[in-house]
Image: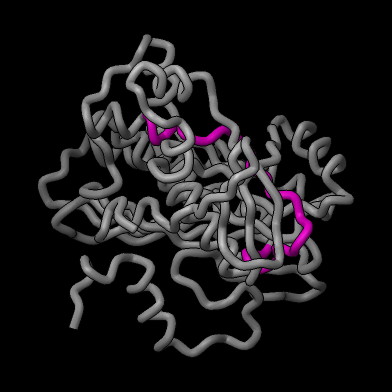
Amino acid sequence: MSTVNTLGERKAIKLIIDRLERDPEELLGLGLDDAVAKETAGGQVLVAHTDMFAAGTDMPPGMSYRQAARKVVVANVSDLAAKGAKPLGLLFSWGLPSNLQEEAILDLAVGLNMGAREYETYVLGGDLGETTELTIAGTALGLTMKDRLIKRTGARPGDVLAVTGPMGLTAVGFKIILFGFEAPDEAVRVNVLNAVYMPRARLREGLALADVGAVSGGMDISDGLAVSLHQFSEASGVGMVVTDVPLSSQVLSFSEHHGLDPMNLALYEGGEEFELLLAVKPEKWREALEAVKRAGGDLHRIGYVTGRKGVLLKQPDGVFEEVEAKGWEHFRRFRK
């Protein structure tokens, strides 16, 4: 029998899912890394998502307890955003080491509250127990209408592939924090570290797109762009072609300074961007752009959906190359 570190997160999830009975009334499909949804009265849909934070793997050096707690909120709200669901409230179970200082507990509580209020919701309660390392498991509850629910399974050939922000910022941040790379200047350092320590859930953008019915399907990007494209492609039973990826000036500057490939950073070495990856109906592309702009966000076209399965990158010279299904994965880190 394999151990969990040889299986990796996604195979372990499949092993578990294959042994659980599916609720026939659940709308999104049984999953351990995505939201679930059930229809209520009047066509309303209750959307729920859970995301866990463990300090040993999820709290990079330099991150404060307040930032860590806020990040747990962002991770949970981000999946509601990807479904077009407005948060109803949050629940958190705290696993605390017995030697954790009172000041740290207070900072964690402030961070949870700060994150909740940022997305106009509240922490409703939870549980507390003793663990060997700091662990916070969150559950986000949201509400939408059935005809506005954005599904990971909804992408269709001909749809426009889009993201709500530039890629690669967290990849650069991890290079600096975890591997000691130098930033070319202080402005780059501040921006990329902020992307890691203070990420944002694209809730307003997700709600705006759901309101205008412009999206066929979508998901949030939490494990890196490349693996998210593969997850989205497989869930929808379609293929995807990437033609352009938005890169910030900080990513380009850092890549040039260190002789790195910025596209490689954007595709494979990120994670926890919490941008939305979307399949937009082509006839509603202009409407989608305007809706996101009104919400104070951006929408970037990165490619298109095809009927041929697989994920490809189209180079400027017209040559296609395969996008590998690799990125962040618990138990295996950045291995494929």
Residue occupying image coordinates x 62% and y 64%:
152
Answer left or right for 232 relative to 147: left
Q: Residue at x 71, y 75 (%)?
A: 39
Residue 201 in the figure: left or right of residue 271: right
Task: Residue 243: give x, y in percent of width and height.
Answer: 64, 42
Q: In percent of the image, x 29 and y 36: which residue is there?
A: 65
Image position, residue 264 (x, y; %):
43, 38
The dominant secondary structure in magenta is loop
Residue 158 on the magenta span: yes
Above or below — where is 302 with respect to 131? above
Residue 230: horizontal and vertical position, in percent?
52, 60
Query: Which of 8/244 is in front?
Result: 244
The residue that appears at 24% across and 34% down in the rendered structure is 178
Work out which residue is located at the far left of the displayed protein and give it. Answer: 99
In front: 82, or 232?
232
> Within the image, what quadrant is residue 186 found in?
top left
**Position of 119 relative to 83 (above/below):** above
In the rendered structure, which segment of residues is drawn in magenta? 151-172
Q: Position of residue 49 (x, y in %)?
A: 51, 62
Q: How is the image coloured?
A: one colour
Please state, as top left, top right, bottom left or bottom right, where the N terminus lies in the image. bottom left
On the question of residue 114 being in view, the answer is no
